[in-house]
Image (tube, rainbow, N blue to C red):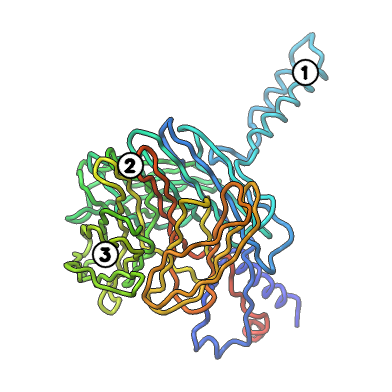
Amino acid sequence: MNRTTLSLIAGATALAAVTGFAAVSAPDPGAAERRTGAATLPVERTGLLCPRPSTSDLAETTYTSFTPVTEGADDKGTAVLRSAAQQSAPDEDAEGEDEKDGEKAGKDENDEKGEKGDKDATEGDQADKPVLQLEEPGKPVTAEADGADAPALVGTADGRFASGWTAQQTTEVAAGTGRGLQGVACSAADTQFWFPGASTDGSRTDYIHLTNPDDSAAVVDVELYGKDGELKTTVGEGITVKPRSAEPVLLSTLTAEKQTDVTVHVVVRSGRVGAAVQALDDETGGDWLPASADPSGRLVLPGIPKDATAVRLVAFTPGDADVDLKVRLAAPSGLITPAGNETLHLKGGMTAAFDLGELTRGEAGSLVLTAPDGSVPVVAAVRVLRGEEGKQESAFIPAARPVETRATALDNTAKGTTLSVTAPEGGAEIRVTASAGTKGGTPQTKTYSIRPGTTQDIEAPVPAGLKGSYALTVETRSGGPVYASRTLASTEGGVPYFTVQALPDDRGMVAVPDASEDLSVLQR
């Protein structure tokens, strides 16, 4: 075998392990016949972006970062989150200032340089200081920020910290528009996002937060779709997001049309960004609306709280074709059809909303939406209310990706945490691990069986001797597909604060073809 062939194989293997572009799922039967073997390896490098938490001076934000222990991971590495405003380049004016100082007569040059050197070193340390940096896999770390100055974060992880790296920000706002508990999992950069469930109505203040992790500017188009089709926008095209910065865009400034239910489509022309919608209401608080799973003919919206007092489904099909969605609720007893909402009609290119009332009626539940033959792709999300009128709080659950191998939820506490798991197609066995606490505690693990077609709010393990908050990691052991979400809840002044985060697969493992199967191709 010549050296060129060896280098190509090594390069392809390293690229797959670093980027995670290879599929985690099992190969198709045809591919299996062509394979001689494959290895599943931990991803070696990954990135996450966290939007700016709040514009309220009353906001109290907790950032959390965590990587589960992964067998086969490197023994070295870092996981660092920094403010998006921090720049890695040195101060461009530093050299010029040194020259000016040297020209000044009658000064001790050595003393002056020494004082300036100390000052530059101090400022450099402050500029480069991470907001969060992991010390070891298996133990979460937290940082806190108050008020409207809490920054958007840009982070990277490599080596032993890359596989399964997860970050979360949780914000409590005591009063004003959007008061309540707001949570969002930090996400990877991408080039396209769908957000059904946003609004340009006068009672709502919705922002699309765009975060650019790269050293070059990104150019983004924001399209809005209402009940009659695409809304006319004034400045939605060609939005520039500066390098390593975050840009919040108020949706109501993009169009003169006021609509209760809007689907936001973010398309990146140049570069890549992280994106999330912050939906704030005058009366019912607010929360983050993460992107829906990619348009599909089958969607699962996991973990609607059992005490939800109102559930509003917002759905959109990007194409021109109409579709009648079949609606089912995966309850603890199995799949049922909600009375009066057996099917929902969507017109192509138009946002549709449906009030499903007290859908769960005191039981755990997840929505399962299906287009006939899966032929028409759809995106969807639900807005959930808890509490009685005058003391209500809201949260959003978009259509989610399944937990194919592993997923993690952060910032859990001994009380007020609910883990909801559904297996709408077939039964599954899952393993749930509670990590060590941020300030102490011993990890605990339990195994659960999820019956086919059901949703279960499981009694998740809690670290022994817990101090602080902890991570919950869900692993699919058999069966599936499995979908999961986590709810954080508390009560403040009689208002049921809460936030829900779906748990998509962490994509921490990648299937890398065995070198021998590429060898024959390269030797042709």
326 to the left or right of 73: left
The numbered disc on residue 317 is: 3
The numbered disc on residue 130 is: none
Front position among marks 3 and 1: 3
Dot 2 amino acid type: Gly
> Can you see residue 352?
no
Mark 1 secondary-structure assignment = helix
Of residues 127 and 50, the one nearer the viewer is 50
Neighbours of disc 2 within 10 Å: few (<14), some (14-19), many (20+):
many
Front position among marks 1 and 2: 2
Which residue is labeled 1 in the image? 112
> Can you see residue 185?
yes
Q: CA distance from mark 3 to mark 1?
A: 66 Å
Of residues 381 and 248, the one nearer the viewer is 381
Q: Residue furthest top?
A: 106
Residue 133 placement (x, y as % from top left): 64, 46
Q: Which quadrant is the C terminus positioned in?
A: bottom right
What residue is shown at x 25% (from left), y 58% (from top)?
A: 358
Dot 3 amino acid type: Thr
Answer with the quarter of the image where residue 299 lies: bottom left
Are the residues tagged 1 and 2 within 8 Å (C-beta)? no
Of residues 467 and 514, the one nearer the viewer is 467
What residue is shown at x 75% (from left), y 83% (from top)?
A: 1
Q: CA distance from mark 1 to mark 2?
A: 55 Å
Mark 3 secondary-structure assignment = loop
Of residues 270 and 364, the one nearer the viewer is 364
Residue 397 placement (x, y as % from top left): 36, 57
Which residue is labeled 2 in the image? 285
What residue is shown at x 50% (from left), y 75% (from top)?
A: 429
482 to the left or right of 201: right
Mark sitting earlier along the chain (1/2):
1
